Amino acid sequence: MQRNVTSYLIMLNVLIFIMMFLFGGLSAFSNPRIYILFGAQLGNLITAGEWFRLITSMFVHGGLFHIFFNMIALFYVGNIVERAYGKERFISIYMLSGIFGNLLTHLFLPNAISVGASGAIFGLIGLLFGAGFRHDTPTILRPVTGTALLPIILINVIWGFLPGANINNFAHLGGLGIGFTFGWLTSIRYTKRSYQGWRTFSYLSYGLIIASFVLLLIFDFRYYIF
């Protein structure tokens, strides 16, 4: 059976989590240096030219509960979006949402070490949320679009503002905003012209993921390992 893009994203996230554990054991998830080695986002490093961390940080997680809940959400929401919108738009909006959420993090939390896929996942939720306000969204998708998602969105955002929550709401809201914009403004149905554009952007997304981890390895060996 052919795997979809959602499955490969989950496998990549889990692989990096396992590698972090093998590298540093349980203490890896409380060690800032190991987070940096594996691609975490930190403002001064991005300012110094390590822009690829805006992407690699989307695949790093801060512990078992963090990756477990994110991957459950990605499996559920990702499969819905990928089936409805196609793999080209799925990966493109996933990456755009995650990057924009991380850019907001860079602007508003420059001193924080930030990791996680939740900004990108919130982009997928935002996409379905926005689709619920379009008249051409298929009836079969209505139960998982629009205001049906409002309780999930509000609970997560409010939880993120609670004292001690240690949740990056800037990534969440940034991803949500990008996803909602595309969900509201674009139809689920493809035109030939739009398909070509999304396919090109999907190739760019895959290329950015690969290039970012190659650059991370280069910078790790150049600056952080030796």
Image (tube, rainbow, N blue to C red):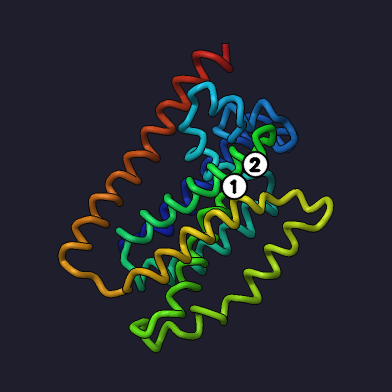
Secondary structure of residue under mark 1: loop
x%, y% of residue 166? 75, 48
Residue 111, percent across and down? 69, 32
Among numbered discs 2 and 1, the one appearing first in the sequence = 2
Q: Name the quadrant of the N terminus.
A: bottom left
Which residue is situated farthest in the right direction here? Answer: 163
Q: Pick out the residue farthest to the top.
A: 226
Would you name the residue on which mark 2 appears? 108
SS category of the residue bearing label 2: helix
Is 88 placed left or right of 117 in the picture? left
Q: Could you tell whether 126 is left or right of 43 in the image?
A: left
Mark number, residue 198: none
Residue 165 at x, y percent in the picture? 78, 53
Picture quadrant where residue 22 is located: top right
- Name the quadrant containing residue 131: bottom left
Viewer-closest of 45 and 25? 45
Gap between marks 2 and 1 measured at Cα: 17 Å
User: What number is the disc on residue 116?
Assistant: 1
Q: Is 119 on the left-hand or right-hand side of 135? A: right
Image position of 197 with respect to 136: above or below: above
Query: Where is residue 169 shown, x and y percent of the image?
Result: 66, 53
Q: Callout 2, which amino acid?
A: Phe
